[in-house]
Amino acid sequence: MSIDIDPLSANAGLTVTDHIENTQFEVYTDRAVEPVATPEEAHYFPVDASVTVETASVEIPRVAVVEARAGDGTLLTRGDAYEMPPGTYHVGIDPAPTKLYLTFDSGFSVSTTERTTRIDLDAPSELTLGFRSLHQVPAGTIETPTDPESLMDAVSLLGSALQTTSPERSFPTLRGHPPLIEAADEFRVPDRIEPPDSGVRIVVPPTYESLYPIVSLAYYFAADVVPGDVPRIEGDGWSHSLEPDFERRAAEALRQSFHFDCLARTEGFYPVALHERETTDLDLDWGRLYDLPLAERLGEYLDVPFQRVEPELPQWTLTTDVRPDPENVEMLPFVAGELSVVRSPETVTPVTAGEGGGVGLFRAPGADSAPRSAPRSATLGPDEFVRGGAGTEHVRGADVGVSRGADASTDRSAVPADADFVQPESVDTVEHAWVGEGVPLDANKATLDAYHRRLEAGQVEQSRISVLVVCNDEQMREEGEVADLYGLRDMVQFDIEVRHDLTRAEMRDVLESDVDFLHYVGHVDHRGMQCTDEYLDLTDEDLDVGISAFLLNACQSYRQGEALVHRGSRGGIVTLSDVANSPATQLGRIVARLMNSGFNLRTALNVAKRELITGHQYIVVGDGGTTICQSRSGMAVIFDIDHVGDKTVDVSAKFHPNGNHGVGSLATLNLDIVSSDYYVPSYVSCTSVDKKDLLALLNLEMVPVFCNDELFWSGNFSLD
């Protein structure tokens, strides 16, 4: 079973472990309980596991919204402080690491503190708790020839994963993962893959560069994709042109329709006070729009000029460049499932290796003419050294030093000088991914094997999160202290180990283990990862990699990290150039804090780039959405302090989709002056916030805080 429910040993309550999503949390009761398995049908919404206990209260260690429904499922109220009379209730608590539902017959009250949410029953009663993993599994695999017209039929089935065609499909838990696509000689579709009849058609020329940019639209609209000369979206009685600038227009249609769905869904099962609904400057009848069939509703959405709504839209999270090649067709369901803006560049700007064979942030001299020259590593100070291999062997007991200066990288490139580096066009989204041949600068190199591992639902033996820090150079021991930054969580159990000076055999054992996150500190060169006796080259060795995610904080570690992904890992952060030790240490500490706080790889690196210019020497390889644990608030939150006065401050916060809380989730700030919900991705701006209130908010969890463009951490942040 994917979810284990066990009594707490030290306190009264339950430990809930979701082995699929690697999340764990505690539910407290007013007395010791022995959970009894209960039929899952006891709950209004579907659950994966259900137990009954006798208690007078339930408490979870996070601030949440409690939604109360009557026995027939009718929504009665939602909030964080209210009372209800005796009756039969279905209660949902959000956010939680899994979907959490309660069923009971009793009056009750809801209350919250700075850190907890509590439900008190009128008297001790039998209470049934239901848990549903937020893991999403495709319904099956579509086999298809890879010519564009056959592929159109496959893409037309992506919307079969939608659990509704109402505006509520803007919630991530009601979309479902699109079916997979697999290249084959004949077109075959499993019987259980049946798309809804949405009445929406997308017409595009039968070419890869026209088909790939509309896969997210096809999925979200449950649209039929058909060939035609003029790109457009259409329904009965209306047509919306996707020209001129086809890719831009497709992205605008996705963002606008999703935004309007989030506004319209407040007329349905979730009538929340949505900030975006309150601030919209459009005279639309949202109640009428909510009740319309999808195609009619979409036609009215797209009848509004994009320029009218663009100022209200939050910054979209992800752009994915998918090269228009048939071998990339199997990536399309994963790209669509993330609701990514998609581009399909027919040509790409090549980048040649700079001096020393590596690439990084700074362009080499004479790089103004095409083909572009790859950026070089930063200039090193007189007492600085890089994390590449030394010119002499670095073995235990040998009297050798560590090479210093940029020249140390000569004839040493984990990424060869003739590698196919590419410079994707810039994006206006927070994150950027690349699918296809080439090593992209400043973008996540996404790979199919990594995305497939996201779906693997194998059970794990332990319920704790394991982090291993390996430091294979004594001059880098300072970064080895990042172990102190992992595990700084109240309700998440970590196993943290630090190991130094591993041999090649020991390093192999580490890579084959089931560690959740490997933080490697050391040297890498063309021979591989440096160990105390010899080098371990992951591109040559037949390794069976078991680690889930990693940071290879060493010079030019791209090829070694790419090999880890191909051999079994989900994803990691790697370097494209020589990296100087001091900024590498800083970046390692930033990433450690963020991964511990539940950020995914892409967002963690995005934060690091804001603080360190050398962060652009790093990219994510594999599944950039990989996390090792869930954040306390459920999503990635980044704060900016804009102005500090004597007693008040101006503050803004950005909510990024993360893990279980994807695009369309609801979020808010736990401040008295914030009375509305926001949909993710969101930007919340507050003026004249009392300093004490802000510090109390920041004390709820460890989050990054930028003040005067400098990165701080909420756990030790002061406004003095």
Image (spheres, helix red, strand yellow):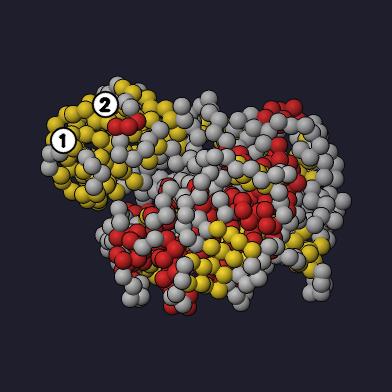
Residue 328: give x, y in percent of width and height: 70, 52
Residue 205: give x, y in percent of width and height: 66, 66
* Residue at the image position 34 percent from the left and 54 percent from the top: 697
In the image, 695 versus 392, the foreground residue is: 695
Residue 608 appears left or right of 556 = left
- Badge 1 density bin: few <14, some 14–19, many ≥20, Cα 10 Å: many
Residue 100 appears left or right of 124 = right
Circle 1 — which element?
Answer: loop
User: Looking at the image, which residue sits at the far front?
Assistant: 236
Between marks 2 and 1, how big is the CA–CA gap? 14 Å
* Residue at the image position 59 percent from the left and 66 percent from the top: 203
User: Looking at the image, which residue sits at the far right?
Assistant: 411
Residue under circle 2? 53
Circle 2 — which element?
Answer: strand
Residue 400: give x, y in percent of width and height: 81, 40
In the image, 215 versus 317, the foreground residue is: 215
Instruction: Name the N-terminal-most of marks 2 and 1.
Output: 2
* Residue at the image position 30 percent from the left and 60 percent from the top: 267
In the rendered view, tell whether residue 299 sits above or below residue 705: below
Q: Is residue 547 visible?
A: yes
* Residue at the image position 50 percent from the left and 55 percent from the top: 222
Residue 357 appears left or right of 86 = right
The quadrant of the picture occupied by the C terminus is bottom left
Residue 233: give x, y in percent of width and height: 53, 67
- Badge 2 density bin: few <14, some 14–19, many ≥20, Cα 10 Å: many
Kindly identify the amino acid type of the residue bearing the numbered disc 1. Ser
Residue under circle 1? 106
